[in-house]
Image (spheres, rainbow, N blue to C red):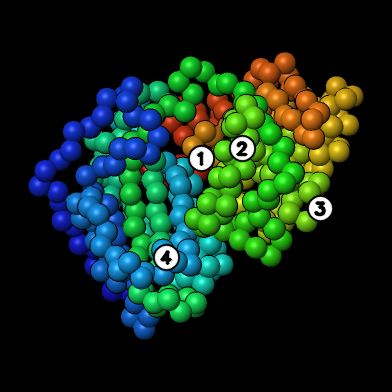
Amino acid sequence: MECQLTITLAEQKKEKPSADKLGFGVHFTDHMFTMDYTEGKGWHDPQIVPYSPLTLDPAAMVFHYGQAVFEGLKAYRNQEDSVWLFRPDQNFKRMNRSLSRLSMPLIDEEFVLEALKKLVAIEKEWIPTESGTSLYIRPFVIATEACFGVRASHTYKFVILLSPVGAYYSGGMKPVKIYVENNYVRAVRGGTGNAKTAGNYAGSLKAQEEAKEKGYEQVLWLDGIENKYVEEVGSMNVFFKVKGEVWVPALNGSILEGITRDSTIHLLKDWGVPVVEKRVSMEDLYEAYTKGELEEAFGTGTAAVISPIGEMSWNGLRMVINKEETGPLTTKLYDTMTGIQYGQLEDKFGWSVKVTE
Ligand SMILES: *Cc1c(COP(=O)(O)O)cnc(C)c1O
């Protein structure tokens, strides 16, 4: 690959938002990384350039047939002012699995990680320092060929954007109310559920909106065939603590393989907490609930890290979990994971990758 990364710095810098106005994904830094793909030539012209709109032909295939994949990870600035990424190699590995599923060209994982580190180092001053804040990183690939033919595009664009984000839990962790969805499904065996592709999100919005109208914050997705087994919660993976044991829906092709999910399983095993990856049915969960054995429930994902579940509604049955309070295991996982990410706790698994001093 001709991979001479060129860097063009912005002449004008934007004003950085104050810590209380960060929000999620609404501010973007001064630069971005882009790289193009042409069939026969491969990936070429990697560059860091001033943040600017993309010019695309309106017939570009991404607009019509949705060949688009993305990733999400974060950079953290620790107390000594050095900058770290959390398991970024896993994100680019997963991106390649998503690309493969969408018939899109694979990327050189090591090269894009090096490019990302350069970009983050250039934007270091954009990484907020207040507790719980970070720099959200959004790599994505889109099909750019102008063609209405239904086939894989011959050209693509890879982009990395950076966005300073606020603390997810500004007023402390608050357990969410979940609506167990048994009409809409997010993904199905053989579909694209285990790829991080835009269409999965477009297809999930309707259920999310209807759950909001009913007074719930998130949807719990069931399997698309029998409507019995738990898959994910919103755009997070999901865990249940039942009688001292932790149940996690096993990866089945329609569940997205979260990196926070994997890290959570590692931590639990390291602590000697029994973790069972299996098909988790709503019936089993409800039975555990009626016996008083459903002790904690939480979602996992990069944005929130750990998100406690305080209530679930399933076919009119209401389950209140741990008196709608964040449970001790949920809290320990959140504190440990974020402690490692911010460099405050020992990183015994070697998850953190240094970007710059
Ligand atoms: C990204 C994502 C997750 C969480 O993955 P992490 O790597 O932990 O951030 C879970 N479910 C879906 C559907 C996702 O898109």
Classify mark 3: residues with Cα within 10 Å, few (<14), some (14-19) or many (20+): few
Which picture quadrant has residue 329? top right
269 or 175: nearer the viewer: 175
Numbered disc total: 4
Residue pointed to by mark 2: 210
Q: Nearer the viewer, mark 4 or mark 2?
A: 2
| Residue 170 badge | none
Which picture quadrant has residue 123? top left
**Residue 153's x, y, as percent?**
42, 75
Label 1 vs 2, first from the N-terminus? 2
- State the residue at coordinates (62%, 56%): 193
174 or 87: nearer the viewer: 174
Q: Is residue 70 visible?
A: yes
| Residue 302 badge | 1
Q: For the residues marked 4 and 2, what is the alpha-carbon distance in whole angstroms?
A: 27 Å
Label 4 vs 1, first from the N-terminus? 4
Q: Secondary structure at mark 1?
A: loop
Q: For the residues marked 3 and 2, what is the alpha-carbon distance in whole angstroms?
A: 22 Å
Name the amino acid, label 1.
Answer: Thr
Q: Secondary structure at mark 2?
A: helix
- State the residue at coordinates (36%, 83%): 40
Q: For the residues marked 4 and 3, what is the alpha-carbon distance in whole angstroms?
A: 32 Å
46 or 231: nearer the viewer: 231
Q: Quadrant of the N terminus?
A: bottom left
Label 3 vs 1, first from the N-terminus? 3
Question: Circles 1 and 2: CB distance less than 8 Å?
Answer: no
Q: CB at mark 1 closer than 8 A to ligand 1? A: yes
| Residue 62 badge | 4
- State the residue at coordinates (36%, 62%): 158
Label 3 vs 2, first from the N-terminus? 2
**Residue 249's x, y, as percent?**
73, 45
Name the amino acid, label 2.
Answer: Glu
